Image (tube, rainbow, N blue to C red):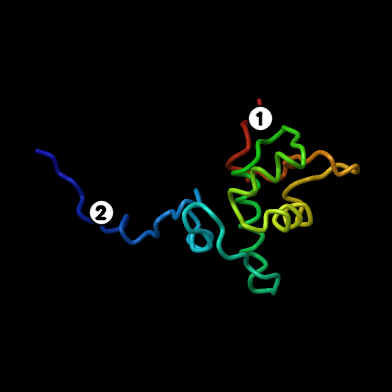
């Protein structure tokens, strides 16, 4: 006989739908609709933390660690995330979630972008 915990379904239904964000952070999920950011948090002090978390999430889900990207590749990746992809690219660079070389030709995800839980184990 299959015994299933009825409270498990109830707790799952209380969690917000992913909305295509790929995040488990309810505040970030609310900023997405159909996999795209529909609202960018402002730079006001109470929204700065959320904006930083959102930018970190976008960077780590859109780019691979250790790979260089051209501006065209960065734009292509960000077009699918936010309508103003040029501003988003600037936000990512200004917040150090995406590094740009001095010539402005290549972009790279910085090693510090990964949270400790996501970093590969040291041997």
Point out the tag, 1 or 2, that comes first from the N-terminus: 2
3 above or below 42? above
* Image coordinates for residue 40, horizontal then vertical, percent: 62, 65
How dense is the environment of label 1, judged by Cα within 10 Å: few (below 14), some, or many (20 and up)?
few
Residue under the point 50% across and 57% down: 25
* Image coordinates for residue 116, horizontal then vertical, percent: 63, 43
Q: Residue furthest top?
A: 123
Quarter-of-image position of residue 13: bottom left
How dense is the environment of label 2, judged by Cα within 10 Å: few (below 14), some, or many (20 and up)?
few
Separation (CA) of disc 1 from disc 2: 38 Å
Count of marks, rendered view: 2
75 above or below 86? above
Label 2: element kind: helix
Q: Tell me the quarter of the image containing the C terminus.
A: top right
Q: Say whether residue 96 is left or right of residue 61.
A: right
Q: Which residue is mark 1?
A: 122
Q: Say whether residue 66 is left or right of residue 39.
A: right
Q: Nearer the viewer, residue 114 or 93?
A: 93
Q: Find out whether the residues at labels 1 and 2 contact each other: C-beta distance under 8 Å.
A: no
Residue under the point 84% across and 40% down: 105
* Image coordinates for residue 109, horizontal then vertical, percent: 72, 41
* Image coordinates for residue 16, horizontal then vertical, percent: 40, 60
Quarter-of-image position of residue 88: bottom right
Q: Which residue is mark 2?
A: 9
Q: Nearer the viewer, residue 21 or 33?
A: 33
Label 1: element kind: loop
Residue under the point 54% across and 54% down: 36
Q: Tell me the quarter of the image containing the N terminus.
A: top left
């Amino acid at each position: 006989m299959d015994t299933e915990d009825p409270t498990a379904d109830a707790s799952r239904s209380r969690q917000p739908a992913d909305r295509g964000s790929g995040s488990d952070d309810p505040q970030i999920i609310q900023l997405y609709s159909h996999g795209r950011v529909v609202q960018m948090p402002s730079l006001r002090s109470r929204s700065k933390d959320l904006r930083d978390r959102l930018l970190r999430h976008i960077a780590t889900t859109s780019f691979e660690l250790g790979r260089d990207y051209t501006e065209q590749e960065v734009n292509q990746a960000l077009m699918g995330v936010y309508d103003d992809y040029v501003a988003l690219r600037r936000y990512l660079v200004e917040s150090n979630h995406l590094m740009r070389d001095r010539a402005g030709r290549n972009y790279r995800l910085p090693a510090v972008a990964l949270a400790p839980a996501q970093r590969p184990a040291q041997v």
